[in-house]
Amino acid sequence: MPFPTRTTTPEIELGSTFQPKFGADGLIPCITQDAATGEVLMFAFMNAESLEHTLRTRKATYWSRSRSKLWIKGEESGNVQRVQDLRTDCDQDVILLSVTQEGPANASCHNGFKSCFYRKLRDVDAAANQGDFSLETTAKPLFDPALVYKRKT
């Protein structure tokens, strides 16, 4: 499915046609959130093929930069993301997916957490003033990745 050619700035920013802007590398950033809670689950990239696959199957599909291949979320773990809604930002260079997470752990992170954003900067002021960049884990893992993912040796 070829996506529409990008046109004028007013049409891109205020119009009614989806005209995704892929970068020079062929990728567009994608933020994925839980449809029920709004919690940000993960961030990944899509290319035209993965975006088309996502629209066609309603299964969140990304482009794995490290493996240089399509990555259907849940293909190994069983924790599939079913797309409920797709949005784009004002200049159509970022995608926002709202998904329902389905699977044995209902987790999106390959480290076993519900969200990839399971850590926070412990103290923003301490980071700014003393250079203390300590992280605090704010969630518990829902599964053991070593038991779920095949490891290549």
Image: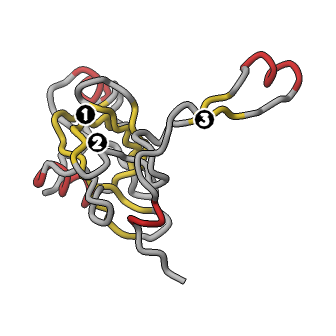
Q: Which residue is mark 1?
A: 98
* SS under mark 1: strand
Q: Residue furthest right?
A: 130
Q: For marks 2 and 1, give the one nearer the viewer.
A: 1
**Side (left or right) of 69 relative to 67:** left
- Determine the CA span between mark 1 and mark 3: 24 Å
**Label 3: how many residues lie within 10 Å, few (<14), some (14-19) or many (20+)?**
few
On screen, residue 120 above or below 3: above
Name the amino acid type tagged 1: Ser
Name the amino acid type tagged 3: Thr
Name the amino acid type tagged 2: Pro
Residue 137 in the image, given as x and y percentages of width and height: 60, 35
**Side (left or right) of 54 relative to 127:** left
Q: Residue, x 19% and y 51% (percent of image)?
A: 59
Residue 30 in the image, given as x and y percentages of width and height: 37, 42
Q: Work out whether mark 1 precedes mark 3 in sequence or the reverse, and give the earlier one.
A: 1
- Determine the CA span between mark 2 and mark 1: 17 Å
Residue 87 in the image, given as x and y percentages of width and height: 25, 31
Q: Quadrant of residue 93?
A: top left
* SS under mark 2: loop
Q: Which of the numbered marks, if any, corresponds to residue 137?
A: 3
Q: Which residue is mark 2?
A: 20
Q: Residue, x 39% and y 57% (percent of image)?
A: 26
Q: How is the image coloured?
A: secondary structure
Q: Residue furthest bottom?
A: 153
On screen, residue 69 above or below 119: below
- Determine the CA span between mark 3 and mark 2: 35 Å
Cβ atoms under marks 3 and 2 closer than 8 Å: no
Residue 17 in the image, given as x and y percentages of width and height: 16, 33
Q: Nearer the viewer, residue 115 or 45?
A: 115
Cβ atoms under marks 1 and 3 closer than 8 Å: no
